[in-house]
Image (spheres, rainbow, N blue to C red):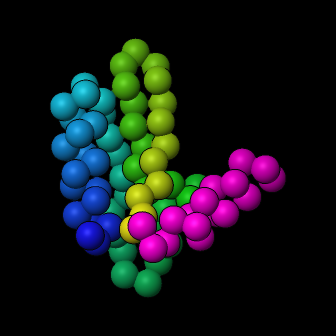
Amino acid sequence: MTESQIRKLALDKIKKQGGVAWYPKKVKWHETDVWGIFDILILYPPSNFVPIQITSKSNMATRKKKILYFYNK
């Protein structure tokens, strides 16, 4: 499954759960992650904020390291 397919599934699920999602537009040759790590920002009213990283199963270990590094800075 590609990242765009996973994003579409995630956005559908977020909408069904009553959340509001935002993600930056993809731009060729540029980093488009929020804060260099997350792909989607979600707000579940009234104030539950959730950042999401989307990746394929084969790339999970790399993304996990990236997220852990971000939180342990």
Is residue 17 part of the magenta span, yes or no? no
For the point 22% across and 51% down, which residue is it? 9
Depth check: 39 or 30 in front? 39
Is residue 69 part of the magenta span, yes or no? yes
Which quadrant holds residue 7?
bottom left
Depth check: 49 or 25 in front? 49
Q: Residue 67, can we see it?
A: yes
Depth check: 35 or 68 in front? 68
In the rendered view, tell whether residue 47 sits above or below residue 43.
above
Q: Residue 27 at what x, y percent from top left?
A: 36, 74
Q: Residue 13 at what x, y percent from top left?
A: 23, 39
Magenta residues, start to end = 57-73
Q: Is residue 50 left or right of residue 12?
A: right
Q: Residue 54 at what x, y percent from top left?
A: 41, 58
Q: In what quadrant of the picture does the N terminus appear?
A: bottom left
In the rendered view, tell whether residue 36 sits above or below residue 14.
below
For the point 80% across and 53% down, which residue is it? 73
Kindly report the secondary structure that dominates the magenta region of the rendered protein.
helix
Q: Residue 12 at what x, y percent from top left?
A: 19, 43
